[in-house]
Image (spheres, helix red, strand yellow):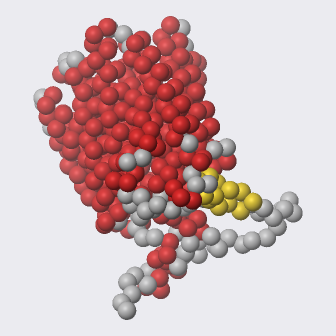
Amino acid sequence: MRRSNPPSRDWRAGLPFFYGWLILAGSVVSLGLTYSVMYSFTVFYVALLEEFGWGRGEAAGVYSVFMIVTGVGALAAGALSDRFGPGRVIAGGATLLAVGLLFCSRLTELWQFYLSYGVLVALGVTLAGWTPCVTIVNRWFSARLGLALGIASAGIGVGIMVVVPLVQILISNFGWRAAYISLAGIVFLGLLPVGLIVLRGRPEDLGQQVDGAGSASVGPTRAGKLPTKRGMEVVDPEWASREWTVGTAARTTRCWLLAAVKLLGGIATQMIFVHQVVYLVDGGYDRMLAASIVGLIGLLSVAAKILWGWAADNIGREMTYTIGCAAMLLAVGLLGLARVVPSSGILYLYAVVFALGYAVSAPLWPIVTADLFAGRYFGSIFGFITLFSGFGNALGAWVGGYVYDLTGSYTIAFGVAVAAKAASAGALWIVAPRKVRRVRRSA
């Protein structure tokens, strides 16, 4: 019988630690670079509005198309990751992402922006980003999945923190065209080696176990207590034992309710995120300060995502998400207050609270999907459900700009964001992932 990839011939098998930690490190880099492109839209948006004089609704529509394409593309990203491996998919996405950004640097008409950023860059982001990274992290972690995805998704915050202010500096000093070219080089040179070298394989390929079981010593802690062991408790064996595919999952109410959670959450988050910089600039705040607030949100979300991942494993998925949604609602109030009472202090408080609310979604959604539909075709199922996140993100970005063009204000749009986020939290309690699987802790 022919054996492929025996552990003894793979250099990774000789490493003295659990290779899953390198999977997490590679995912941090991949997500940080990929989503810095997505979130830098907010600063490019201001520069392009100034140069071309486009309406905010029609220009924000580019971001909406971007979100729709990333959502639809998640279906392909999940299926391709299941078939060819997430690393190869990420490398292909890096190439497409760089090409799209180079086209962005040459645009002169709005339709070119729709094509280059809304389609090409969006396809690159979805192939190099969340779906393949979640798929490979899910292969290496189970009982620690919440913490692992919290760490991985923190890379998005690192990207926002570092790249968004850098893009603003490049735009201010060299122009937006040069900024797009620079961004293309950064993401391509960073993503290609990570995808081809680091993000590949499964634990069994290296003679290791999921969660690194067996790699740590077992014995009393310094406090003299036995270490706590974690494991996934199956609450509903009949549900958990099914061989889930996209087709079988789509025939369940839980699947569509989870899609609603992501749709509503996406509407709320992107309606605020896309328009926050221009909202603050309209209110008289300095552009660099407004861009720095986005960077600060990225910085704070690094720790927040790890915190929410840990919380999901310890206080439950539903409670964690509800607390995060409450933080988002408070943040919207602070953003409005910052216009009524101009104050950098309120602005920084907004950044802290918004970072908490924004950060909860990244680790929670894939964790809940894995609780419900873990198995061989997880990547494809997660891609399918992510489609609705893309629709929500697109709708939120577009509605924000459209409502502003109609009314000259963001008041109604931000009210819609509040209602959508509250409904998203309520829907997750109905999905009830705790009734299928939950983390068990025992001494």
- Residue occupying the point 42% across, 19% down: 416
Q: Give 81 or 39, whichever is nearer the viewer.
A: 81
- The answer to whether 68 is drawn above or below residue 347 in the figure is below
Q: Quick check: can you spot residue 240? A: yes
Q: Position of residue 192 (x, y in %)?
A: 32, 60
Q: Which of 177 and 435 is in front in this view?
A: 435
Where residue 344 sits: x, y (%)?
54, 18
- Rendered residue at 53%/8% (across/down): 341
User: Camera-side residue: 103 or 433?
Assistant: 433
Q: Is residue 410 above or below residue 104?
A: above
Percent x, y of residue 365? 48, 44
**In the picture, residue 243 is in which quadrant?**
bottom left
**From the image, which quarter does the C terminus lie in?**
bottom right
Please name the residue shown 59% across and 75% down the image.
16
Q: Can residue 37 be seen in this view?
A: no
Label total for image: 0
State which quarter of the image contains the N terminus. Answer: bottom left
